[in-house]
Amino acid sequence: MTAAALKADTQDIVVDEVFPHAPETVWKALTTGELMDRCKAAGVMREDAMVEDIGLLMCGVGSASQMEHPVPDAWRRHLAIMLDGLRAQGTPLHS
């Protein structure tokens, strides 16, 4: 899958269907695994990612937003790195 196709597939799932909803609806979709299952089925999310990973990842982004960094809005950089790590072509995780 090309980068453009991957971005289009991910955007359809995340932006069009998740972000227009209230934060509690987004959190429920993330923590119940519904969104993750759909992303995995679409081939845009790594198969070994688990719902339980999301809270830890979000804590990391939250912590990064409070740290000094030479790049303005460094939390966006941290979020991009985190999301890239969830993509389907990621390196297999150790259990």
Image: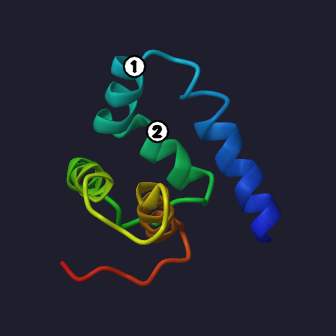
Disc 1 crowd rating (10 Å Cα; few below 14, some 14-19, many 20+) is few
Could you tell me the amino acid type at mark 2?
Leu
**Residue at image location 63% in from the left, 35% down from the top:** 15
Label 1 and label 2: CA atoms lie apart by 11 Å
The quadrant in which residue 14 appears is: top right
Q: How many marks?
A: 2
Q: Is the residue 31 above or below the residue 41 in the image?
A: above
Disc 2: which residue: 35
Q: Is the residue 64 above or below the residue 37 in the image?
A: below
Q: Earlier in the sequence, mark 1 or mark 2?
A: 1
Q: Which mark is residue 50?
A: none
Side of 36 relative to 43 (left or right): left
Could you tell me the amino acid type at mark 1?
Thr
Q: Nearer the viewer, mark 1 or mark 2?
A: 1
Disc 2 crowd rating (10 Å Cα; few below 14, some 14-19, many 20+) is some
Judged from the image, the secondary structure of the residue bearing numbered disc 1 is helix
**Residue at image location 58% in from the left, 20% down from the top:** 20
- The answer to whether the residues at label 1 and label 2 have Cβ atoms under 8 Å apart is no
Quadrant placement of the C terminus: bottom left
Quadrant placement of the N terminus: bottom right
Side of 89 relative to 48 (left or right): right
Q: Nearer the viewer, residue 61 or 3?
A: 61
Q: Residue 78 in the image: x percent, y percent? A: 41, 64
Disc 1: which residue: 25
Q: Nearer the viewer, residue 72 or 49?
A: 72
Q: Residue 41 in the image: x percent, y percent? A: 56, 51
Q: Nearer the viewer, residue 43 or 21?
A: 21
**Residue at image location 54% in from the left, 28% down from the top:** 18
- For the rendered model, the colour scheme is rainbow
Judged from the image, the secondary structure of the residue bearing numbered disc 2 is helix
The quadrant in which residue 33 appears is: top left
Q: Residue 86 in the image: x percent, y percent? A: 45, 64
